[in-house]
Image (cartoon, rainbow, N blue to C red):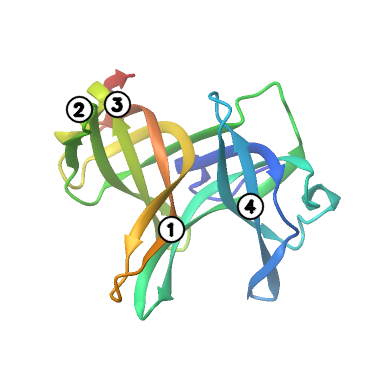
Amino acid sequence: MITTENTHNNSVTLCGRVQHEPVYSHEIFGEKFYEVTLAVKRLSGMEDLLPVSVSEHLLSDSFREGCEVTVSGQFRSYNKMIEDKSKLMLTVFARDVLPYDETINPNTLELTGFVCKPPIYRTTPFNREICDLLIAVNRQYNKSDYIPCIVWGRNARFASSLAVGEHVNVVGRVQSREYQKKLNDDTVVTRTAYEVSVSKITLISDDGAINGAILR
């Protein structure tokens, strides 16, 4: 059971198929952590390939390649130096591992945090409305996770009006998205971004009341 302070601000549950054997990542206070990739199906039948960080204490035969598993935890961020630049990295930090459950939504997330950059509103070539948000979510030890979110449709219009510092709650799913990046030598590489696709966003007032719910 999850009992750590501030876990109510950040919760995610994924049900998916393990893509590869666990790979050692790092060690903190003598505890080793491993990385796996979980393939999580969308309603469309496509799959999101999502990074998961797992403590050695949670590793089991469930994380053999091809096995199906349910992971619950938090969507977290950290900074990593890549090509002499600090890059925001994202991972699902596993707090509990359960048998695969085909009866539940395979990809659910809820965050409560603060808008930490001005929203970016735009439309696609097909005139679909999109708004990019960066949400700071507090966690223990005075740390914060910075989570990129994409908001669609009339939700995007609502999100575009939010000011930096406003307190919001978002519900959605974690998604992976490939994109093309042109390097300094003009070569083009394919990279993967991870973000929250928002299905519901609400504004939380100073007294804790939830206002302005917009549903897609």
Q: CA distance from mark 1 to mark 4?
A: 18 Å
Q: Nearer the viewer, residue 67 or 118?
A: 67
Residue 190 vs 38, above or below: the answer is below
Amino acid at circle 2: Phe
Q: CA distance from mark 3 to mark 1?
A: 43 Å
Which disc, if any, is residue 158? 2
The spot of residue 57 in percent (x, y) is 77, 60
**Element class at badge 2:** helix
The spot of residue 196 in percent (x, y) is 41, 40
Q: Which residue is mark 4?
A: 37
Q: Which residue is mark 1?
A: 190
**Element class at badge 1:** strand
- Mark in front: 1 vs 4: 1
* Figure disc tally: 4
Q: Residues within 10 Å of mark 4 (few under 14, many from 20)?
A: many
Amino acid at circle 1: Thr
Amino acid at circle 3: Ala
First of labels 3, 2 by sequence position = 2
Q: Which residue is mark 3?
A: 209
